[in-house]
Image: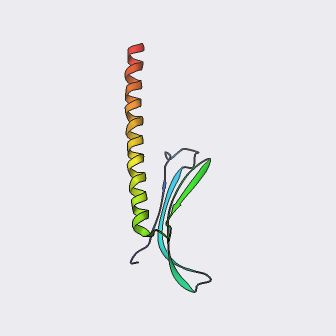
Amino acid sequence: MATNYNNRVWLNVYDSHYTGSIVCVDKTDLINRGHHLERYTFMEISDCHGKIRIHTDPNFGMEAYIEKLKRMEHEIRAFREHLEREEANESVRNTWLR
């Protein structure tokens, strides 16, 4: 592996007291008391009440992991678009009720 990737993004606004974040790591590291190198890859999403770590599975390989991330990305986008439509519809409904 040529390069390492290690990035953390805070998901809440700057002055929020909430702790949402996403951490993405892809690195090669010494394991088993430094005897051999192994690739360590995961994405961790957390908020105040919980977290989930999505990691690679050596039985399925990196291609399967990348496909999993693509499916997640698609569903997150679809869910966000649904919420945006609902929010817009709610704004229209509230205008009618005035």
Indicate the position of residue 69 as horizontal and vertical percent values: 42, 57
On the image, the x and y values in percent for residue 80 come to 41, 41
Give 16 or 7, whichever is nearer the viewer.
7
Quarter of the rendering containing residue 36:
bottom right
Query: Up-down: is 25 above or below 97?
Result: below
When the figure is inspected, residue 1 is found, relative to residue 26, above or below; the finding is below
- What colouring method underlies this structural image? rainbow
Query: Relative to residue 93, is residue 69 depicted above or below?
Result: below
Residue 98 point in image, percent of width and height = 41, 13
- Say whether residue 56 is left or right of residue 1: right
Camera-nearest residue between 49 and 54: 54
Q: Residue at x 50, y 67 (%)?
A: 57
Q: Residue at x 50, y 46 (%)?
A: 12
- Look at the picture and state if 49 lies above or below 89: below
Residue at 42% x, 68% y is 62
- Closer to the camera, 42 or 15? 42
Q: Going by the image, does 38 lie left or right of 33?
A: left
